[in-house]
Amino acid sequence: MGKRALKIGQISDPHIGEDESLVQGIDVRKNFLEAYNSESMKDLDLLVLSGDLANEDAEPGAYSYIANLLKDSKVPVCVISGNHDNVEVMGQFFDLDGKIHDGECYYRYDIDGRSMFFLDSTNGTVSGKQLAWLESEASKVEGEILLFVHHPPCYCGHKFMDMKYSMKNIEEVQATLSRIKNLKYIFVGHYHFETEIEIGNQIVYVTPSTQMQIDPNQSVFCLSSAAPGWRVIEWGENFLETKVYFSHTP
Ligand SMILES: [Fe+2]
């Protein structure tokens, strides 16, 4: 008998501020709630928050707001850190026990014998230490794995983000990823837009932000929409389906 499919929700880049003030004129808390309370996010097996939970500089109010919202949920939550986060501060609000190694938060999380990996790209790179750990841990898993990390390990056809904020050690990261044969699907955020990029035999799914979207066709920062977006993933033994949703009420 095949194992049942897992349903995973991914919320990325909510950029919650210290308090309820609007962020760049956007009610980011309302946007976060739209994603979190969406019909599409019902009956999850796992919720992933893929970085930039805080707006600018690891505001504790951002983490306390999200942690409070999630505290009564029965759905497990995997949190990763983005370039506006700080794992020490995050660890005061989320259970990161055993997940922080030398200041970096990376770990494996299993559900029903299926393994997902979470990396830390807070400083714009994935360290060699994490890459070695990922390659070694992934080789211990028999079936397919999933990988979540904040920065895309590739250029994404987004003029502004590719030029200014892409991952800094793409080549090194791709060299490791290409050797991990049981890894096909990689989920990221950071770019504030939606796309899919093939790198070798792997697909990088870029998930939009719940804060706002950035126009990929402009080389300067240009807001394309203040509507929140999020992703739902159905991961079965021999298939993966994923869909991005946008709110209609920006
Ligand atoms: Fe980011």
Image: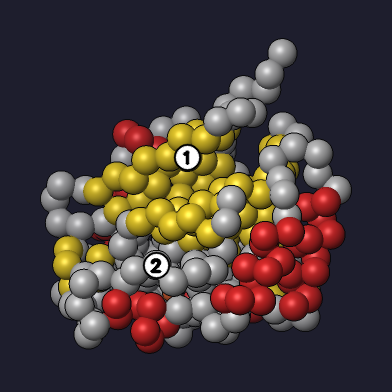
The outermost residue toward the left is 249
Is any part of residue 97 visible from this angle? no
Residue 29 in the image: x percent, y percent?
Answer: 30, 62
Picture layout, residue 226 above or below residue 187: below
1 or 2: tag closer to the N-terminus: 2
The amino acid type, in three-letter code, at marker 2 is Cys
- Secondary structure beneath dot 2 equals loop
Tell me if mark 2 has few (under 14), some (14-19) or many (20+) residues whose alpha carbon lies within 10 angstroms of its own: many
Who is closer to the viewer here, 58 or 111? 111
Residue 61 in the image: x percent, y percent?
Answer: 43, 74
Residue 149 in the image: x percent, y percent?
Answer: 56, 63
Location of residue 191 by image quarter: bottom left
User: Which corner quadrant holds the N terminus?
Assistant: top right
Colouring method of the image? secondary structure
Front disc: 1 or 2: 2
The amino acid type, in three-letter code, at marker 1 is Ile
Quarter holding ligand 1: bottom left
Who is closer to the viewer here, 221 or 43? 221
Location of residue 137 by image quarter: bottom right
Task: Judge left or right: residue 120 versus residue 204.
Answer: right
- Secondary structure beneath dot 1 equals strand
Identify the residue at image location x=43%, y=39%: 242
Residue 202 in the image: x percent, y percent?
Answer: 57, 52
Task: Judge left or right: residue 233 versus residue 172.
Answer: left
Who is closer to the viewer here, 149 or 132? 132
Question: Disc 2, ligand 1: is the CB inside 8 Å?
Answer: no
Identify the residue at image location x=15%, y=56%: 250
Identify the residue at image location x=30%, y=80%: 160
Is any part of residue 176 visible from this angle? yes
The residue pinned by badge 1 equals 233
The residue pinned by badge 2 equals 156
